[in-house]
Image (tube, rainbow, N blue to C red):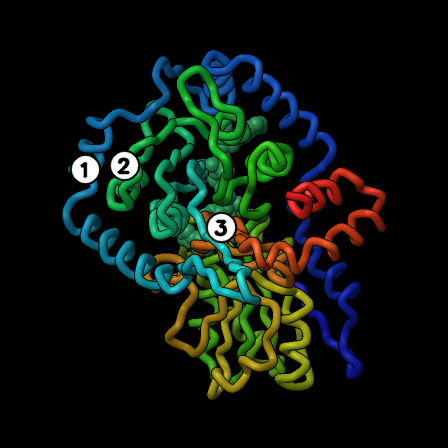
Amino acid sequence: MEWIEVPEKGLTLREVRTMTNRNVNLSDDLEKSVSAILAQVKEGGDEAIRALTKKFDGVDLTDFRVSESEIEEAVKAVGPEFLAVLKEAKGNIEAFHREQVRKSWSKTFRDGVELGERFLPIQRVGVYVPGGRAAYPSTVLMDTVPAMVAGCPSVAMATPPGKDGKVNPNILAAAYVAGVKEIYKVGGAQGIGMLAYGTETVEPVFKIVGPGNAFVAMAKRLVFGTVGIDMIAGPSEVCCVADGSANPKWIAADLLSQAEHDPRAAVFLITPDKDFGLAVQKEMEKQMKELSRYEIMKSSVDQYAKAFLCKDAEQCFDIVNKIAPEHLEVELPDPKKYLPLIYNAGAIFLGKYTSEPIGDYMAGPNHTLPTSGTAAFSSPLGVYDFVKHSSVECYSEEAFRKISKKVQLFAKAEGLTAHAHAMEVRDED
Ligand SMILES: NC(=O)c1ccc[n+]([C@@H]2O[C@H](COP(=O)([O-])OP(=O)(O)OC[C@H]3O[C@@H](n4cnc5c(N)ncnc54)[C@H](O)[C@@H]3O)[C@@H](O)[C@H]2O)c1
Ligand SMILES: N[C@H](CO)Cc1c[nH]c[nH+]1
Ligand SMILES: [Zn+2]
């Protein structure tokens, strides 16, 4: 873990960005290889999907749609205990996301002028669920439950097949609990291409959401415009602001919980207490060796772990706002009092018992969050990502006659005589 002693005057945004550079690795080479995959899917359809799945996932698939019996088998395989946990998590996620639903509205603004907005679910959405290094049934729930709450009538899911040509049963059981029936065993950039362009057997979608590796992120960037996307998600991150009142063992465990996602995951410790920070560092080294995903955590910690030593809490949160982390844990006494100092963080966890993994699985808020500093301008995945709205305008004859001349003046000022004419023909009749 690299230590940064923050000077008295603090650090600039540019300095913090340079120190915590977590580029999503969207290089030119990656762009070229992903463009080629997307072009192959666009031209070759189903056949290209089969060839690319063979090439990148090492499996030969004739039919890449998951069958109903595969879903039934998976539900049996996961057993009642895990199924009950999935159902409870789904209930918590649904309850939280219901609060995000916006109602259509209309009202009379001036005599004879009714204006409003209609909030409408996107009619067909695609959800990518990562499945390379680890299978994430929790991400199935996080990405599909908001779509269901929004009322999307058609949801298609893409996720990589395992070496046996099957989708991980935990993923299928989560899809079953969420009510998703259209699932394809197609991962990586080819999965994104399939959803964006469609094939002979897969209808294209209007928007694609969900996290994934650099191939997935680049593919989402390249299909944006053909379809909508939620965000370009990078490797996971966690930032913890804590002082000597916190337990170094617990903080180290929370930091490692995100380091285990990806060798490029980033962990940040921000503290006014160097001895405490060193104790956390020592604990991380110790705990890492005792956990199974050692290599991934070691790579993440060696390359991307940073500890900032600050003069006080205000300076700690100034650094937080400049990092704009995906997850922020505040483990200081009376943590709620620091909320007014926090502007940029995807999800905020307050107090020593609100360990980040609770939010990953059970609390209810979404775990698909902005990464790599993008929490400064974007938000967690939510119902709003599955909804778009139309404005609605309705003028009575009286209201039209009152406004017509003003519209004509405006149109003529822009040299748009056909616009003015649309008013004139009504005025004349
Ligand atoms: N932000 C979130 O909410 C969240 C949640 C879960 C996971 N994640 C992140 O998602 C990522 C998951 O990555 P992953 O790799 O485990 O799974 P993934 O499903 O994103 O990618 C696996 C696919 O990548 C493709 N691929 C692999 N090597 C390739 C190559 N050389 N060329 C072309 N395609 C190739 C394969 O088709 C494979 O199916 C991690 O970074 C993790 O941190 C984020
Ligand atoms: N922490 C991840 C988002 O960065 C989400 C996740 C899925 N499973 C466990 N964690
Ligand atoms: Zn996690």
Q: Is tag 3's residue or tag 2's residue first in the polypeptide sequence?
A: 2
- Between residues 51 and 67, which one lies in front from this camera angle? 67
- Between residues 122 and 57, which one lies in front from this camera angle? 122
The residue beneath circle 3 is 385
Whole-percent x, y for residue 340 in the image: 57, 82
Mark 3 within 8 Å of ligand 1, using the beta carbon: no
**Image: 3 above or below 375:** below
- Between residues 222 and 7, which one lies in front from this camera angle? 222
Q: Are marks 1 and 2 in contact (CB under 8 Å)?
A: yes
Q: Are marks 3 and 2 in contact (CB under 8 Å)?
A: no
Mark 2 within 8 Å of ligand 2, using the beta carbon: no
Whole-percent x, y for residue 292 in the image: 40, 50
Between the C-alphas of marks 3 and 1, the distance is: 33 Å
Q: Residue at x 50, y 39 (%)?
A: 208
Q: Quadrant of the N terminus?
A: bottom right
Whole-percent x, y for residue 31 in the image: 68, 31
